[in-house]
Image: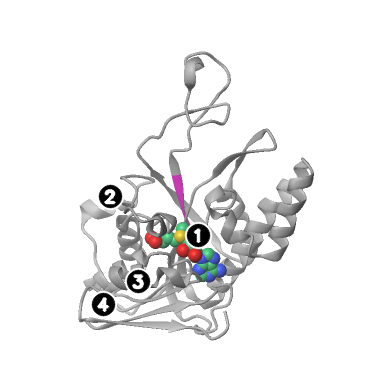
Amino acid sequence: MQTQHRIIFGNSQQMSELEDGSVQLMVTSPPYPMIAMWDELFVKDPKIADFFRELDTSSNGETVRQIYGSMHDYLAKVWAETYRVLVDGGIACINIGDATRSINGKFQLYPNHSRITEVCEKIGFTTLPYILWKKPTTKPMYKGKGAFLGSGFLPPNAYVTLDCEFILLFRKGKLRKFPPKDALRYESVFTKKERDEWFSQIWSFKGARQTSTDLERRTAAYPEEIANRLIRMFSVKGELVLDPFLGSGTTTKIAIQNERNSIGYETDPNLLPIITKKTDTTKEAIVKIIKRQKN
Ligand SMILES: C[S@@+](CC[C@H](N)C(=O)[O-])C[C@H]1O[C@@H](n2cnc3c(N)ncnc32)[C@H](O)[C@@H]1O
């Protein structure tokens, strides 16, 4: 089956290229609020930049809450656009990690998964049971630093390691309906082994192989297996899959492999060569790169 893929260099807070109710599945991993590597991206929003400036001059806990809240406001605009473009019964899958961070000497957990769940419910989504992606263990933390140091065996000042990420699942409206014996739906069948493994709550495999260039590391790609499972679990061959935070193009690559159409949004034009390399896989897929005139 020939499939069509659009990569839009533009901001997914407005997806004017997509009509209401035109997408069957959204699969994504956004920049994670309160993870330092994404600060540079979030401060492009003038409101968030102002809060960071305020933080430099005070150790006010309220400012930290405002930074955290406004990072989620930034993402919320994309979740609301996703709701608009999904078909009735369409599914949204969001891979997100919680964050821990010490700010002005205060260590704290930022539970991104629960904030996104609250926001998506307010938008109108139905929350479905989520998946925990268990990553290979990193070192436990002592007083907010990356290792236990000498006191590693003494209670009570160590923190539990964040070694799981969430794959949050939401549905717009009621269950999707299909005509009896819908051919493409039957062609998209998964095996009993796949069903038992994929629909269980804990998934355990390594993170994406991070290649050496700084730019590729900065995309924080998720494992192809995450996109592969979600696309096969929640869409049918020939349907349209959206990734509003495309990064290196993993979702497009896996949509191509699974004979789904796709559309991805990315704000960073420097990622074009990485995306092109990743998605240049088969002649059966037509990949169009579109640069918006205005972001
Ligand atoms: C965590 S990365 C996605 C990684 C991706 N799953 C992969 O496998 O490569 C998030 C990406 O979202 C992009 N981004 C952030 N805000 C955006 C927005 N408003 N619209 C489109 N892309 C955005 C960032 O530039 C970054 O590349």
Which residue has dot 4 on it? 184
Residue 51 at x, y = what percent? 74, 54
Q: Earlier in the sequence, mark 4 or mark 1?
A: 1
Q: Which mark is residue 30?
A: 1
Q: Secondary structure at mark 1?
A: loop
The one of 141 and 244 positioned closer to us in this rendering: 141
Label 3: state its secondary structure.
helix
Q: CA distance from mark 2 to mark 3?
A: 37 Å
Residue displayed at 55% across by 44% down? 99
Q: Nearer the viewer, mark 4 or mark 1?
A: 1
Q: Main secondary structure of the magenta part?
A: strand
Q: Alpha-carbon neighbours of circle 1 within 10 Å: few (<14), some, or many (≥20)? A: some
Amino acid tagged 1: Pro
**Residue at 57% over, 31% down:** 144
> Can you tell me whether the CB of the residue at mark 3 lies under 8 Å from the nearest atom of ligand 1?
no
Q: Which residues are magenta?
A: 165-170
**Relative side of 5 to 147, left or right:** left
Up/down of 281 relative to 93, above or below: below
Tell me the residue that label 3 is attached to: 273
Q: Are marks 1 and 2 in contact (CB under 8 Å)?
A: no
Badge 1 residue CB within 8 Å of ligand 1: yes
Q: Are marks 4 and 3 in contact (CB under 8 Å)?
A: no
Q: Residues within 10 Å of mark 3 (few under 14, many from 20)?
A: few
Q: Secondary structure at mark 4?
A: helix
- CA–CA distance in space, label 4 to label 1: 30 Å
Percent position of residue 123, x then y: 63, 66
Disc 2 residue type (three-letter)? Asp
